[in-house]
Amino acid sequence: MRAELENTEWRWYGLIRARYSSSQLLSVGLGAIFVEQPKSENCAVGCMLHGWQLAVEPGVYGLQGSVGWGRLAGETGQLQHLIPTVYFGCAARGAVLRTWGGSRPIEPGQTFAGVEANFSILRINLAAAVMHSLSSNSPDEWLYSGSIGWGF
């Protein structure tokens, strides 16, 4: 058991996604997943990962930040710390969204917090979110959002 623990290390891998959503319209997200792996593990040709994720996603109508737990099967190819190819993945994240511009159907200048669930298969990403307004004068108390995109 001790030998197994000594042969592992913490690593991070970058994640990217672009998507169309009902809350941000078009957005591009950058994030990372932090995992504990055997030192001998090489994700160039594929590996299974699970760990903490964080992401920042600016869009046409707002900015979203999220933190959560995810699991994926993917590969880095020749990129050491970026996983552009996700064959399968799922994640549950806590998220905060700040709206701006003339966002429709949501008024600009509002802040929402809630949960987002993600599912990816063969690079296609589907997500759903439920968020509650943190703004006291908000005309929109609840936000239900769905999206489709590329990446994880």
Image: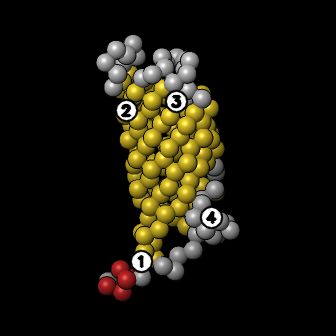
Q: Residue at x 48, y 17 (%)?
A: 107
Q: Neighbour class for label 3 at 10 Å: few (<14), some, many (≥20)?
A: many
Q: Residue at x 38, y 22 (%)?
A: 142
Residue type of the residue flagged with mark 1: Thr
Which residue is nearer to you in this view: 9 or 117?
Answer: 9
- Residue denoted by label 4: 76
Q: Position of residue 12 (x, y in %)?
A: 49, 63
Q: Disc 3 on helix, strand or loop?
A: strand
Q: Earlier in the sequence, mark 3 or mark 4?
A: 3
- Residue denoted by label 3: 62
How is this picture coloured? secondary structure
Residue type of the residue flagged with mark 4: Thr
Q: Choose top left, top right, bottom left or bottom right for residue 8.
A: bottom left
Label 3 and label 4: CA atoms lie apart by 30 Å
Q: Neighbour class for label 4 at 10 Å: few (<14), some, many (≥20)?
A: many
Label 3 and label 2: CA atoms lie apart by 13 Å
Q: Position of residue 96 (x, y in %)?
A: 41, 35
Q: Disc 2 on helix, strand or loop?
A: strand
Q: Neighbour class for label 2 at 10 Å: few (<14), some, many (≥20)?
A: many
- Residue denoted by label 1: 8
Q: Are marks 3 and 2 in contact (CB under 8 Å)?
A: no
Q: Earlier in the sequence, mark 1 or mark 4?
A: 1
Q: Which residue lies most toward the bottom here?
A: 3
Residue type of the residue flagged with mark 2: Ala
Q: Nearer the viewer, mark 3 or mark 4?
A: 3
Which residue is nearer to you in this view: 55 or 122?
Answer: 55
Q: Position of residue 27 (x, y in %)?
A: 60, 36
Q: Nearer the viewer, mark 4 or mark 2?
A: 2
Q: Is residue 15 left or right of residue 143?
A: right
Q: Earlier in the sequence, mark 3 or mark 1?
A: 1
Residue type of the residue flagged with mark 3: Gly
